[in-house]
Image (tube, rainbow, N blue to C red):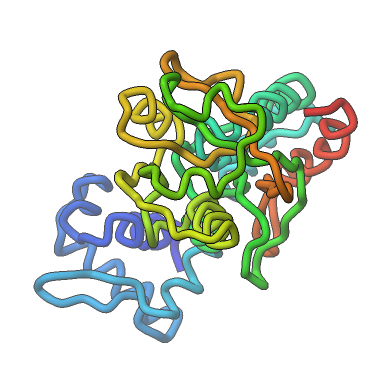
């Protein structure tokens, strides 16, 4: 098995298109197909299902992908090892996050990594919802991700970082803005702006569950992946949004955060990573978690 075979496999697995993968690798499509055939012969099974219209990973391909990435990452670490002084932690980490929902956690952790391990290269991947994050952690395209807890996966480790009580983001002209006691049930006639249904968002699930428990099913007017864009739509009067209190300092002009009375409901912010062996850089990041939490978020 050759390194270039693994590079070709990863390119096709990420592009799911032989032509695009060939362009990315700066080679012709036919030689690329031959390389993939050699790799499949080497491992003894097909890694892709392909026809004239589509390419997709087989179950064996899905299983092979994170290990292929790990081999190339180890090779890159080996190259870096000859350039970095002994005892210095180095490497590359990809960290997934949602957006404004992580405005309390993301800056603290990225600052801690930069200050403690300056040789670790940290790539931030935005707008990654919980279920997508789990899939990317499984595939090895993410090393770590901020997620909403709990999650349903036996292949992923998690740690609770922060709990935030939910409230409502409403237009400043909303009749409940100046009310002293506001409950979620009082928004039963409002139009809600939520993450996309079926998009794997923990926030969407929290919204539906909370409204149902309050005695109504929300009228959904818009579905937006980015929570900050949801708040921008609130400002235009499109609807209201059920969001955790951590967004309160960053709500856009024309909106207000309204705390909710009654039984408190919380968003549980967590950090997630794969149970598959991780890099020294990932272990160093995880070693900072308790330190950051002790300082407060």
**Relative horizontal placement of residue 86, taking residue 136 as reference (left or right):** right
Residue at 46%, 27% in the rendered image: 175
Q: Nearer the viewer, residue 158 or 79?
A: 158
Q: For the image shown, how many numbered marks are present on the structure?
A: 0
Q: Name the residue nearer the viewer: 55 or 75.
A: 55
Against 44, residue 270 (above or below) is above
Quick check: 201 left or right of 49?
A: right
The residue most toward the bottom is 44
Q: Quadrant of the C terminus?
A: top right
Question: What residue do we see at 49% from left, 71% from top?
Answer: 64
Query: Percent x, y for residue 262?
Result: 71, 46
- Determine if residue 92 is in view: no
Q: Is residue 43 visible?
A: yes
x and y percent of residue 139 in the render? 50, 61
Residue visible at 61% across and 37% down in the picture: 182
Give how far across and how far down residue 131 sits, in percent. 50, 59
Which of the two residues, 190 or 209, is positioned nearer the viewer here?
190
The image shows residue 152, relative to residue 188, as above or below, that is below
Q: What's the residue at 68%, 32% (across, down)?
A: 105
Q: Nearer the viewer, residue 31 or 141?
A: 141
Q: Quadrant of residue 156?
A: bottom right
Which quadrant holds residue 107?
top right
Q: Residue furthest left?
A: 52
Residue 7: name its quadrant.
bottom left
Residue 238 in the image, given as x and y percentages of width and height: 30, 33
Looking at the image, the residue that sits furthest to the top is: 253
Left or right, residue 161 beside residue 145: right
């Amino acid at each position: 098995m050759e390194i270039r075979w693994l590079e070709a496999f990863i390119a096709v697995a990420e592009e799911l298109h032989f032509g695009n993968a060939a362009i990315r690798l700066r080679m012709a499509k036919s030689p690329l197909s031959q390389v993939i055939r050699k790799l499949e012969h080497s491992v003894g099974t097909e890694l892709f299902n392909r026809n004239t219209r589509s390419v997709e990973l087989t179950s064996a391909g899905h299983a092979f992908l994170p290990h292929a990435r790990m081999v190339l990452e180890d090779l890159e670490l080996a190259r870096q090892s000859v350039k970095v002084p002994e005892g210095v932690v180095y490497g590359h980490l990809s960290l997934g996050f949602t957006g404004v929902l992580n405005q309390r956690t993301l800056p603290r952790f990225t600052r801690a990594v930069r200050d403690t391990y300056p040789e670790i290269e940290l790539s931030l991947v935005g707008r990654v919802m919980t279920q997508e994050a789990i899939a990317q952690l499984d595939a090895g395209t993410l090393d770590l991700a901020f997620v909403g807890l709990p999650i349903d996966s036996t292949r992923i480790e998690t740690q609770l970082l922060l709990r935030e009580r939910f409230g409502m983001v409403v237009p400043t002209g909303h009749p409940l803005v100046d009310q002293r006691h506001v409950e979620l049930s009082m928004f039963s006639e409002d139009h809600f702006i939520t993450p996309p249904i079926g998009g794997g968002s923990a926030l969407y699930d929290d919204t539906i569950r909370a409204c149902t428990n309050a005695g109504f099913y929300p009228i959904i007017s818009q579905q937006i992946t980015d929570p900050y864009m949801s708040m921008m739509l609130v400002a235009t009067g499109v609807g209201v949004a059920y969001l955790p209190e951590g967004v309160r300092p960053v709500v856009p002009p024309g909106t207000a955060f309204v705390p909710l009375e009654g039984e408190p409901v919380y968003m549980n912010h967590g950090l997630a990573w794969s149970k598959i062996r991780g890099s020294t850089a990932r272990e160093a990041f995880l070693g900072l978690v308790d330190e950051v939490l002790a300082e407060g978020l």
